[in-house]
Image (cartoon, coloured by chain):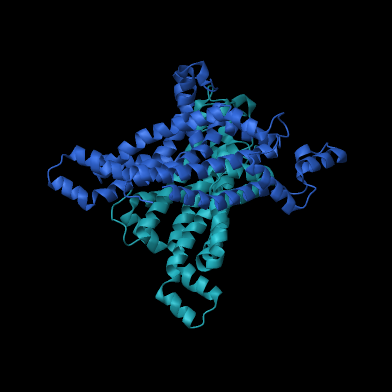
Amino acid sequence: MTRYLAGRVAALLPVLLAVGVTAFLLLHLIPGDPAAVILGPDASAAQVARLRHALGLDRPLAVQLALWLGRLLRGNLGDSIFLRQTVAQAIWQHLGPTAGLTALAEMLAIGAAIPSGVLAAWKRHSRFDQVFMSAVLLGVSIPSFWMGLNLIAVFAVAARWFPVAGYESPLRGVGPWLRHLLLPALALAFTQAGLIARMARDATIEILDEDYIRTARSKGVADAAVLLRHALRNALIPTVTVIGTSLANLLSGAVVVESVFVLPGIGSLVIQSVSRRDYPVIEGVVLFAAAVYVLLNLAVDLLYAVIDPRVRY
Amino acid sequence: MARFVTLLVRRRPMAAAALAVLGLLSLAALAAPWLGLPAPDRIEMAARLHPPSSVHPFGTDNFGRDVFARVLYSGRVSLPIGLAVMALSTVLGTAAGLLTGYYRWLDTTLTRLLDGLMAFPAILLAIALVAALGVGARNEVIAIALVYFPRTARIVRASTLQLRERAFVEAAVALGGGDVRILTAHILKNAVPPLIVQSTFVFAEAILADAALSFLGLGVKPPTPTWGNMLDEAHVFIALAPWFIVFPGTAIVATVLSLNLVGDAVRDLADPHAVAGRGLG
């Protein structure tokens, strides 16, 4: 296990390096002089020169890359140009709403997707399966932010069950926190549920054709027991992979959904930073999100060992 | 093409209907200026936020502009953006996929780089790229294509790896065929079916990404209408005019859903091993 873990982590390093280099190149994609672009048209030459120096843009590209990677290794994402704080502090401050939102959305999505996916596979080609497949296709075709707008129109504006927008810290009570997060989480969960449910159905269909399922049924095991004890557990394995990628998708969707519900999360931080031309923050958030994705996938790989005892290292 | 449509109508009626919806949406967008509609930017302050009526079938927006005309005109922006993203990411993805699949020495480095690119959440990377390149239709296309081409590359690479070992490729090598000829005439030609399927899905993703970016104010800017920026305007008036969010959103869903249906159908029809009757339609 330790050797496997070490191998997996070692395999991550080149990917993380590629991620770092890509994020570094973002700032250098800016046409012309990034310092001049950041400061806007009214800046004096001296101001531009000072920012160039502060950002290290006056050094050779290779030196800049090496310094930036060195800083990253020490966990330093740099300083915000606009906010009086480091990029890491800004991310930390905005992490709460995004983490709560994505976790809630993922729980809702899994809760709906896995039982319905397994059931659709069990009743393959039935009426339920057809409705299920249509719902899945609709789920992946509806933009989550539009879903959010519809939920606001129905449940916040018309029914007045939920606030239209805003956020409440869970420290001030779980109830208000949940009331503010439930609609955005539902909007996000719809798409995710589609992705996970399709995977769960496919995986279950494959497993239901296995010999050990036929054996179980022929020796008279009840349908429910076959489904729960034999099929579900094995169908979970490929489904777990999709959950890893879906969490990354959720981060992507969260950016837009946060802006619909005015949640002060990572997405809002990015959008604000774009209009403030605060490139170090944009770069930092993008890098942070990619790192989360890579680490989540590592966690998923390790989860295999827990769910599937056949995986040996 | 005609044979494909007949096959679709017979075996996948839902996908055939989806193809018809796509054709209708494209035709409406193309013909919009000649349909006798009010100009999409004609402001009529006396008719602000009117609900759907016989004069304005989709109602009017906060400037009294005709929402039906604006939804059709949006197709003139969003559909070409989707097409351009599809074209660009297919070209980039095919090139990267062929190279990494065929040349082992390139495979490790380039594939790692593409894996790195795929680790970024899609919309977040597109936002960062647009922020760096500047707002505008051209930069938006570049940004979205850069986000999605590694997925295409991965699929072409997988086909290339398989085809490279096949006897007919070996025969072509033995006959002294050059790399370029082998890659294009023998490998690419046989990798086309999965590539078409993938391109359809990229088109759908591009429509969704364009909608998200222009909803956030990072796509094509008003007064030029796009489905995304109309939803941004509708958001403000959601309490006064809840119907306003319905139409641009439905246009997005109709486009994306149709593309997904067509993509699924092409995949199943192209794959002789696919179980008949699986999936929709």
Please indicate whether residue A156 sits to the left or right of residue A24 in the image.
left
- Of A228 and B73, the residue lying toward us: A228
Query: Where's residue A19, x and y in %?
Result: 59, 48
Residue ranking furthest to the top: A172
Please indicate whether residue A45 sits to the left or right of residue B214 in the image.
right
Residue A210 sits above or below residue A296 on the image: below
Q: Residue at x 28, y 51 (%)?
A: A206
Q: Kindly tell me whether residue B135 is visible in this rendering.
A: no
Residue ranking furthest to the bottom: B175
Query: Where's residue A283, x and y in %?
Result: 65, 41
- Of B270 and B224, the residue lying toward us: B270
Q: For residue B1, which quarter of the picture?
A: bottom left
- Of A132 and A3, the residue lying toward us: A3
Q: Which chain does cyan denote in the image?
A: B
Q: Exactly how many numbered labels are in the figure? A: 0
Chain A, hue in figure: blue
- Of A191 and A286, the residue lying toward us: A286
Q: For residue A111, which quarter of the picture?
A: top left
Residue B138 sits above or below residue A108 on the image: below
Query: Where's residue A172, x and y in %?
Result: 52, 16
Q: Residue at x 56, y 35 (%)?
A: A255
Q: Residue at x 58, y 47 (%)?
A: B76
Query: Where's residue B93, x and y in %?
Result: 54, 59
Please indicate whether residue B5 sits to the left or right of residue A205 in the image.
right
Q: Residue at x 37, y 61 (%)?
A: B270
Q: Kindly tell me whether residue B76 is visible in this rendering.
A: yes
